[in-house]
Amino acid sequence: MALTADKQALIWKTLNETRGKIEPSEYKNYIFGLMFYKFLSEKAQTWLDSQLRGETWASVWKQNPEKAAAFMQTKLGYVIQPGEFFSDWQAAINVDQFNITNVADALVHFNQEIQQGAKATFEGIFDDMDLASNRLGSNTQTRTKTLMDWISLIDQIELDEDADVLGDLYEYLIGMFAANSGAKAGEFYTPHQVSDIMARILTAGREEMPTYSLYDPAMGSGSLLLTTASYMKNDGVRGAIKYYGQEVITTTYNLGRINLMMHGVEYNDINIRNADTLSSDWPDGVQSGVDSPRMFDAVMANPPYSLKWDNTNREDDPRFKSGIAPKSKADFAFLQHGLYHLKQDGRMAIVLPHGVLFRGAAEGRIRQELLENRNISAVIGLPEKIFTNTGIPTIIMILEKNRTTDDVLFIDASKGFEKQKNNNKLRQEDVDLIVETFLKREDVDKYAHVASFEEIKENDFNLNIPRYVDTFEEEEPVDLVAVSQELGDVNQNIEQSEADLLAMINDLAVTDDSQPIIESAKQLLGGKHE
């Protein structure tokens, strides 16, 4: 049973009321960390209940801690010691025996007992929860009280055990924190409607593939990976879908790891890394002088727009053989990196600023080579103000490695949205129309056009959407006779109003103080009506 919008909004309101003076951008680290620890605790407890057959975890642990730890590691990849479950924290709070060290010790033990093969998934995942921070309180007592309030609050949130429901709540809260944490914080979040468009296009006709590999080189919170996987028939089947990603910001990297697991993705299907995608190619790439990059069925990305990057000494980097993007704008560098890691029959979707369509110099040369290689399949123009971190209009570019045709589909979807308080939002009908138009690949008057390579070449490889999709609406001709009649009526109404006002002034009682004002008004209006 899914959480209703009203329930989601109530949870957000309740959570937000407890944060006090802590900024949302920092508060989210504690809330998400505690939510995730509760998720892991309940998952471990459910598994233990199915395995121990009446024995307690405490007694098994007491008999042989090392063997007990290995027992849990083998299945879950992590260990939670007896007395350190989320429910144990709440029990201690209920009898007034809780201290912030309960949490601190549990997190230390958790980090120490991660299975070797699961370290990339779990290690350091709670590092953003700074339990010594003065923002939680000026001393241990006040910090303990703050943590108690949050634990009790999260414990009271009634959640369905279905991972989708828990994951949907987590995704909802990510979006709310992004919207309320300033422009910079929005960089980790792609609105679900945009993710949905990209996911449906990427998976169209491929939903029943037995195995499927996904890669996001600027993964943020991981929403693009998750949304894409959700359209596959084998979503949720262990080992069927492999998730790869890279994220340079450590806090956001942790957020993404948590998001994947909160949606029920098993740790051994997750392969993500905290590093700079453009500086160090991954996964695999050049090793011992041999280039052996890993290729993926689908690549998706919403990288930071026009990012400055170090483009020196890139001539020998096989990712950038079509040209090197300028140091002031890494947009094409992210695109080339993703395309490089795409399988021959794969599909890629990337969100970029409009500038990549028409900027010249190095970017113009890269764009021309991509077109000559038949890599660009479609350009979809989105409305402005649909992202929390920027008001600029953006595009989704769809690319393939081994196309047999050289045309490009242009879709101008910039006018289809619902206006909200500070942002615009794509409606479901807007999303459906974009996807359906992509799949049909036909001209639609004032909305879409399939441009031939010759047409694009005639435009000097400029892909600016208005060159191909004419959205101009001709205004109705002006009826001069009707306008003249309306002006006459307006003048007649003005004259009648002034005459009525003059009559009212004549009826006024005159005093010494008002005499000069009334005479001036009579002169002004009377002159017009003589």
Image (cartoon, helix red, strand yellow):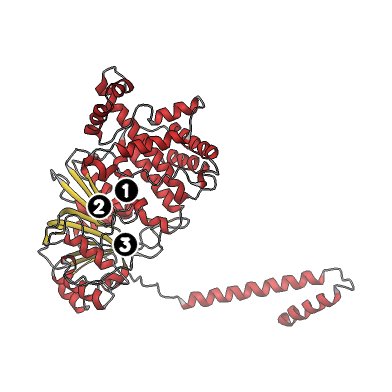
Residue named by callout 3? 413
- Percent across and percent down for residue 353 are 32, 66
Residue type, mark 3 in image: Ala
Residue named by callout 2? 245
65 lies left or right of 28 = left
Q: Are marks 3 and 1 in contact (CB under 8 Å)?
A: no
288 lies left or right of 236 = left
Q: Nearer the viewer, residue 385 or 430?
A: 385
- Percent across and percent down for residue 273 are 26, 51
Q: Which quadrant of the figure contains the C terminus?
A: bottom right
- Looking at marks 2 and 1 on the same chain, the residue that comes earlier in the sequence is marked by 2
- Looking at marks 2 and 3 on the same chain, the residue that comes earlier in the sequence is marked by 2
Q: Is residue 354 above or below residue 425?
A: below
| Residue at the spot 51% in from the left edge and 48% down from the top edge | 22
Q: Is residue 420 above or below residue 354?
A: above
The alpha-carbon separation of the residues under discs 2 and 3 comes to: 29 Å
| Residue at the spot 83% in from the left edge and 68% down from the top edge | 508
The answer, for residue 123, to whether it is visible in the render is yes
Q: Dot 1 surroundings within 10 Å: few (below 14), some, or many (20 or more)?
A: many
Residue named by callout 1? 256
329 lies left or right of 294 = right
Q: Secondary structure at mark 1?
A: helix
Residue type, mark 2 in image: Gly
Q: Nearer the viewer, residue 490 or 453?
A: 453
Q: Secondary structure at mark 3?
A: loop
Q: Are marks 2 and 1 in contact (CB under 8 Å)?
A: yes
Quarter of the image where one finds residue 323: bottom left
- Looking at marks 3 and 1 on the same chain, the residue that comes earlier in the sequence is marked by 1
Q: Nearer the viewer, residue 217 or 375?
A: 217
